[in-house]
Amino acid sequence: MASEIDLYNQYPLHMDPATKAITLPQSSAYTTTQQNTVTNELNELNTLHRALLSLDPPNIPPPPLPVNPKRSAQITKLRESANTAFRKNNYAEAIRLYTFAIDMGVTRPGWEPVTLAREELAGLYGNRAQAQMALQAWPEGLVDAKLSVDSKPMGNVKAWWRVGKCLAEMTRYEEAKGFLNKGIELEGQGADSAKELIALLIDVNAALKRVQGA
Amino acid sequence: MVNWLSLAVPLAYLGVLIGSLATFSSLYRKRKAQKAMSLEPWFPAHLQRDIYFSLLHLDPSSQSEKKTPNVPESVQKAALLRRATEDIRRVMTLRNQKQALSVLLQRGSVGDDLWQRFMRAEKEMEEEVRDVVSEANAYTPNWGQTIFQSANEMMNNEIYRQRIKEHEDKLDEERVWWEKKRTSVKESFMKELNEDETSSPQTQSQTQSPAAKASEIAPATPAKTAASVQGSDDDAVLVEADPSSNQASPSGGKKKKGKGKK
């Protein structure tokens, strides 16, 4: 057993001397699927390597906490300006800025806490959903709202409401009902925040009846 | 002298006894180990680990080839991180499976082989984790304490990014669906409008009725009746002239704006 830990399969890897990128040279020894999995893994490795190089020496990822505040500050700034654009009814601009902020949030380095990324992106996606809805871009709004809900299911009433609203606008009442029920369930039936959801659910149910009756 | 002779018999007896026991035990152990070895491993080959070791062992072979520089340490660190991430995934899988498997074993639903395979995988992972920690400490002191924290976050982040991607991939599908739906709704309006125009000269009064019908079929706001009538009005405008729908949109937007912002 002791020798087992030292056993491994050798891959004839090749390193580009300039970029330090690792590749697996094409060889007949591997099937295409094997080749593909190894190549995918190596791509991940190279991306991670580049991320590590951008860090200060000794080039190891810092412990998850505390977080480097630089990126968070930039995202907050972008969100603020996007919110301002939204308030001025400049929805296209708001969407553009939210998209920038979301991109920054998504490209957060992997070793930073996932809860932070989720929290941040839930807000950003929720806000972008609202901007999309203001432009009556229902499918886009729906996807964004769903993303927001997925990132942070608890305490995210607005996003649940937006999912329901977008679906209702696209006449997909059944789906809207499902999402709204789930949102209400998570929020708690009697909770104050669930009121909007319940109101929308009533509307959706009425619409559903009307469609079925017609 | 006499003592030695009389002792020879018990000594020989002991020798034979111990010898046979030792042979039996070594044979038994060997066979058991062989059996364990012949069992299928729990996990497939550890690709990240293979790559990591391949990188470590790249140096001697490359020296014989050309003047390729050694693999820089940062690449090795990245490979080690990838390896740690995969380890976390496997440890988690084992932890999740253990409970269910032990219950199944107690009930006799699964064979002993499976349990042995599992125990072996667990032992291997323990050793693997220890190995990663010592390797990490060799690169940078104290990295071993945090490498698995980082790896855990990396794994979770990866899962999360994948979910984001899944959702975003659906966007095109949704868009196409909505486009189709909208045009079909629009067409049905047009048809009704045309029919009405041809059937009766009183277009003025007739155009109102399809608009009213629209509230049934169209994606009207399922809010109060007032709102739904307004929604169908918008649709009627939309049928007559497309660009004007842009004018209609802000009013819809304002309606929703009340439902706040953070």
Image: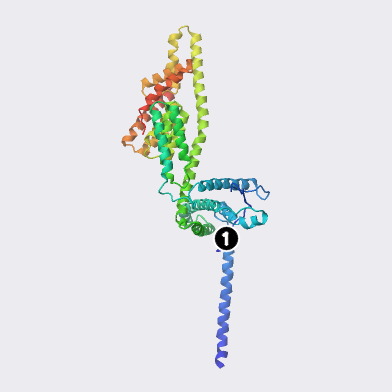
Toward the bottom, the furthest residue is: B2
Q: Quadrant of residue A93?
A: top left
Apparent side of residue A62 relative to residue B33 in the rendered image (left or right): left
In the rendered image, the quadrant that contains the C terminus of chain A is top left
Apparent side of residue B7 relative to residue B145 in the rendered image (left or right): right
Please provide percent x and percent y for residue B87.
51, 53
Is residue B195 or residue A24 the one in the foreground?
Answer: A24
Amino acid of disc 1 = Asp
The residue under label 1 is: A6
Toward the top, the furthest residue is: B201
Q: Quadrant of residue A142?
A: top left
In the rendered image, the quadrant that contains the N terminus of chain A is bottom right
Q: Is residue B259 above or below residue B95?
A: above
Q: Is residue A86 above or below residue A114?
A: above
Q: Is residue B203 visible?
A: yes
Please provide percent x and percent y for residue A47.
54, 45
- Element at label 1: helix
Q: What colour-coding does the image apply?
A: rainbow
Identified at 61% across, 56% down, the residue is: B59
